């Protein structure tokens, strides 16, 4: 006879386990409430006489309780039920002590090295990891069916993100940055109005990224084409400034050079804000925001020229890298970059081929960006080209 356990495992029938369970309950009652060894053997025999190929463990336990009740050993039956319940609680006992203590002692390498954007030695990260261990424990013991946990532990499936499953928060986000920049948004109960310049738009964007990262787990993606409008606003602002201040004192050509210089200064500062804010911000769960920037030039975009300038600056700054604590330029882990190959930049004489050459140079030195084909996306997504959610989850 085989026995099917609660977690779905099928094991050989073992009569000794039944005998021991009844005996343990037996010693906890008065001798008048106890059953004899002969009665225990009879109970076991009644189960074996069913001659079933397979019995559920719960069915076996139910039969034992019924037999004890039939013998009018009500106190013993109660003790057996309590024993059965206690064993169930032992199976579901909290198992987080060792894992939490190993986190605090910085010895739990599996958890501590799981994410490249988490510094597991700082307090906020450790609090997040400790909460994650509690979530994994409750997920395994309470929230998921045992057969799912068994399959996960046997490697049949992989149940991802148990460390966040306890809470009703979500994984990965495609931020509607265009709407929040154009129409304003609210953070921490405060209204953030639509930016009037590129630099402010970049700052607001990184604030949004940080706020989202603190309220979810996983990655997030931002389509940078929404920033083109604000680079245009900056140009218009400088154009008004120089016209009002200098009027006809300087020529149109000189004024345009002044405007272009100021514009490129703000462009560099804005992109640097994005890069350094993302790499230095620490979210509430102790990690850098896991961000992907989507670099796409839409031929119908009225701000395509501004967006080309933004993409160029992003690639140039990524090629340069970011200084580490020793002052050496290194490749930052974030933001990830995805560059879209299209007809106008596919190295076949397109107007924006220079950007693709710059992207390839960046990939050769810094491993980023990754590439997607606008042509293939249009074929697969009804003519649409759009950012993936997180690092590759289309």
Image: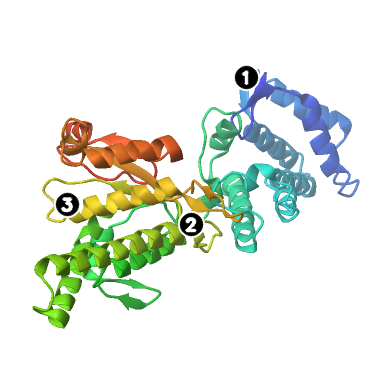
Front one among 85 and 327:
327
- Determine crowd level at label 2: few under 14, some 14-19, many 20+ residues with C-alpha closer than 10 A: many
- Most extreme residue toward the right, as rendered? 31
| x, y percent for residue 104 | 72, 56
Image quadrant in which you'd find residue 227? bottom left
Answer left or right for 64 relative to 303: right
Image quadrant in which you'd find residue 278? bottom left
Mark closest to the chain's N terminus, 3 or 2: 2
Residues at circles 2 and 1 in contact by the CB criterion of under 8 Å:
no
| x, y percent for residue 366 | 45, 40
Residue position for label 2: 279
In the structure shown, which secondary structural element does the residue marked by tag 1 occupy? loop
Look at 49% across and 62% down and name the residue there.
281
Mark closest to the chain's N terminus, 3 or 1: 1
Residue 52 shows which numbered tag? 1
**261 w.r.t. 365: above or below:** below
In the structure shown, which secondary structural element does the residue marked by tag 2 occupy? helix
- Give me the C-alpha separation between circle 3 and circle 1: 74 Å
Residue position for label 3: 304
């Amino acid at each position: 006879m085989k026995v099917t356990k609660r977690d779905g495992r099928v094991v050989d029938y073992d009569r000794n386990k039944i005998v021991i369970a009844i005996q343990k309950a037996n010693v906890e009652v008065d001798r008048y409430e106890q059953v004899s060894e002969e009665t225990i053997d009879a109970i076991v025999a009644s189960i074996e006489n069913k001659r079933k190929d397979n019995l559920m463990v719960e069915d076996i336990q139910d039969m034992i309780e019924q037999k004890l009740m039939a013998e009018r050993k009500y106190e013993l039956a109660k003790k057996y039920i309590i024993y059965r319940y206690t064993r169930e609680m032992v199976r579901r006992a909290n198992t987080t002590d060792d894992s939490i203590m190993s986190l605090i002692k910085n010895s739990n390498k599996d958890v501590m090295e799981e994410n490249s954007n988490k510094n597991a030695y700082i307090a906020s990260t450790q609090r997040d990891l400790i909460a994650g261990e509690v979530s994994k424990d409750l997920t395994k013991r309470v929230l998921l069916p045992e057969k799912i946990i068994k399959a996960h532990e046997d490697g049949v499936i992989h149940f991802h993100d148990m460390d966040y499953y306890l809470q009703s928060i979500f994984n990965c986000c495609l931020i509607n940055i265009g709407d929040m920049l154009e129409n304003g948004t609210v953070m921490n109960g405060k209204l953030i109005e639509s930016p009037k310049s590129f630099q402010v738009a970049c700052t607001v964007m990184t604030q949004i990224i940080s706020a989202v990262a603190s309220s979810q787990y996983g990655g997030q993606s931002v389509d940078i084409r929404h920033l083109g409008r604000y680079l245009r606003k900056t140009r218009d602002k400088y154009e008004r400034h120089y016209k009002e201040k200098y009027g006809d004192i300087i020529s149109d050509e000189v004024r345009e050079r002044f405007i272009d210089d100021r514009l490129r200064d703000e462009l560099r500062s804005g992109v640097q804000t994005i890069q350094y804010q993302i790499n230095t911000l620490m979210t509430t769960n102790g990690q850098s925001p896991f961000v992907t920037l989507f670099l796409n030039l839409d031929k119908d975009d009225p701000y395509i020229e501004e967006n080309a300038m933004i993409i160029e600056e992003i690639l140039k700054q990524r090629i340069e890298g970011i200084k580490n604590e020793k002052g050496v330029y290194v490749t930052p882990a974030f933001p990830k970059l995805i560059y879209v190959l299209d007809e106008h930049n596919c190295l076949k004489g397109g107007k924006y081929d220079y950007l693709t050459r710059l992207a390839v140079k960046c990939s050769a030195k810094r491993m980023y960006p990754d590439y997607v084909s606008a042509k293939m996306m249009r074929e697969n997504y009804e003519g649409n080209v759009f950012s993936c959610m997180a690092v590759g989850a289309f």
